[in-house]
Image (cartoon, helix red, strand yellow):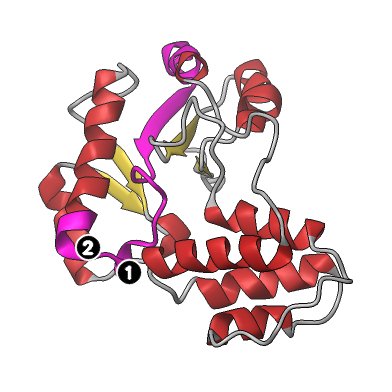
Amino acid sequence: KDKRPFVVLTFDDGWADFYENAYPLIKKENIYATVFLPTKYIDTNSIFWTDMIGYLINRRKEDIDCIGSKSGIIRNIESLTGDNRTIIEKSINMMKNLTTDEIQDTILTLCDRWKITLNPSGKSFLSWDEVRDMYKSGNIMIGSHTENHHILTKLKKEHLLLELSNSKERLIDEGVVERSFIPFSYPNGDYDDRIVDMVKNVGYNLAVTT
């Protein structure tokens, strides 16, 4: 028997550059990988909230004079020092502790305070045609990364169920999975016993974390 260690290749998020860069190499070498998709983002020009934060911080003008905010998270972000990459990383880490609504409110507040309109250009995510092309190749398995890429431990039961079930049904409707085996990946790697049980009950056959 071959005693060399096995490697399992998985890719989260469904970025467009996977199809442009990684997929051709995977086909050339005839190896296999699984791509986990946040289904609401596929075939859209939307971006994750983490990328919105990067967009805002990279465009914030130093001469913008903002009166101190009553919001602790806003004060903390605006008080960060260092290069933009460091500020972005620290801001995202702080915001991961917020609920989905709090994250949205924070982004809208920063847009208003920094006088920036969110208008990113370019295609960030795969199209469904690209996903189908990869699936039909036999080299790529498709899985769910929820619908909206929310951190699941921050969601109430009803919202969590929708994230799991809507994503699964969309993958089935798009014809990129077999009903008999659909894998799942936890956004940000976060889960607990409640979420594990729900992932099983919705009908996923395997789940991965970081």
Left or right: 77 with respect to 107?
right
Q: Considering depth in this image, is 30 or 160 the residue closer to the camera?
A: 160
Residue 124 location, quadrant: top right
Please tell me whether mark 1 sits on a helix, a strand or a loop: helix
Residue corresponding to mark 1: 154
Where residue 41 appears, as percent x and y from the top left, is 46, 36
Disc 2 vs disc 1: which is toward the camera? 1
Residue corresponding to mark 2: 195
State the separation of the CA atoms marked 2 and 1.
11 Å
Left or right: 140 with respect to 154?
right
Amino acid at pointer 1:
Lys
Span colored in magenta: 131-159
Where residue 39 appears, as percent x and y from the top left, is 38, 35
Residue 66 location, quadrant: bottom right
Identify the residue shown where x is 75% and y is 72%: 87
Residue 210 at least partly seen? no
Amino acid at pointer 2:
Ile
32 is higher (above) or lower (below) than 144 = above
Identify the residue shown where x is 20% and y is 47%: 162
Identify the residue shown where x is 60% and y is 79%: 74
Of labels 2 and 1, earlier in sequence is: 1
